[in-house]
Amino acid sequence: MQMSDTFYDNWTTQLRKGLLELAILNTLGAGPLYGYDIVRRLGDVDSLVINEGTVYPILSRLRNEQYVESYIEESSSGPPRKYYRLTQRGREELRRMNSHWTSLHEAIGQLRKERAR
Amino acid sequence: MMDFTPEAKRKFDEYLLRMRVSMQGRRAVETTEVEQNVVEHVQAALAGVPSPVGPERLSEVLAQLGPPERWLPEDERPIWRRWADRFMTGPEDWRLAYISLALMVLAIVFVAVGGVLLVIPAYLVSRAYVEFLSDRGEPLGARKWLVLPPIVLLMVALGGAALFGPAGGFGAILSEVGLREFGWEWDSRADRMRIFTGMLSIATGTYWIVLSALFALLVRPFRALFQPLTANLRAGHAWALTAAGAIVAAFGATLLYLF
């Protein structure tokens, strides 16, 4: 592997890790979901989740920090499932995080425009 | 609860144990909650698979989940805790790698009193660890710096002894007295050196050709002994040793012919 590939791989790994919490909160922004469903939805986003298991410790931490809450619901197709939903605090934090992400995205876009000139 | 075959159940229990160990000491993460989610995940992913579920199907789901040791960033725990956990929490972490390193350090420190023999257990631990990671489909990564030294050392020592050890023996046999017994006579020191070098080269070259044939026959066990260093070794590589042997023997024959 070339050195530039290693650099790129490390960078994308760090970026993915940094964005995963934002992605999970946004996924829950649409409504309550259980763990496997969150993973499936994130899996649909290209190269966002490499190891699906990484989602679960993040969910536990988000719940401990009261950004999400969980509840058990019976399932028609198997054992009861643990669902997660955003708390009020989680919604506010998600708003702030999305706003920051938009600012970052715009700033990078601006830099790219300047380079293109 | 989903039914697993005994092997799949053992595999899943082992995976959950690794998960629990890797979550130890992580602030703000509840192991029981993560475990419950992982169990639900596996059940959901395998819904529709005929019971009992075998290890192959389970392995596919666990591979998608990834190694639990990589689910959280390393820097969430204090460094002393990470080191202690790696050493204390079983072979699924870095324990074998550290044991191998410790044995190598002891081998160096006590080299004057036979400590070099510790290279053998260090090699065995390293080799077991390489196999363990291979079974789990994990790369060695940074652990290679802890695990590979005894394998490299033993490979170089045994390889060197196999290649050049007998040459020393031939040299002793072909000493001055030995050469006279072979019927050689010479007038000058230079001629004696030429006969000695010629005979030694022919003997060593011939030995290498025989050794290359043995190597081609036994390439599999040799490859297994020194994995992962010898992962790409093939029987065809024996030709390099055959060619080297032929060149050395031809050089020796030329020296004797010129004499």
Image (tube, rainbow, N blue to C red):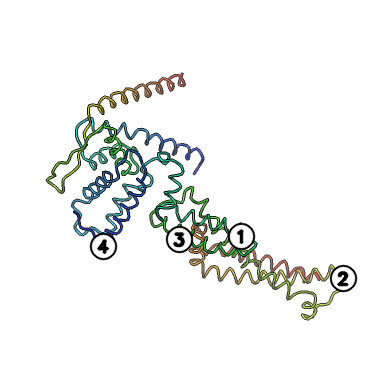
Q: Picture coordinates of residue B73 (x, y %)?
A: 40, 40
Chain for numbered disc 1: B
Q: Is residue A63 above or below residue B66?
A: above
Of labels 1 and 4, earlier in sequence is: 4
Residue bearing mark 2: B188
Residue bearing mark 3: B128
Helix, strand or loop status at disc 2: loop
Q: Nearer the viewer, mark 3 or mark 2?
A: 3
C-alpha gap between disc 3 and disc 1: 24 Å
Horizontal side of residue B196 vs A73, given as left or right: right
State which quadrant residue B172 falls in: bottom right
Q: Is residue A75 above or below residue A105?
A: below
Residue bearing mark 1: B110
Q: Picture coordinates of residue A102 (x, y %)?
A: 34, 23
The image's mark for residue B6 is 4
Q: Nearer the viewer, mark 2 or mark 4?
A: 4
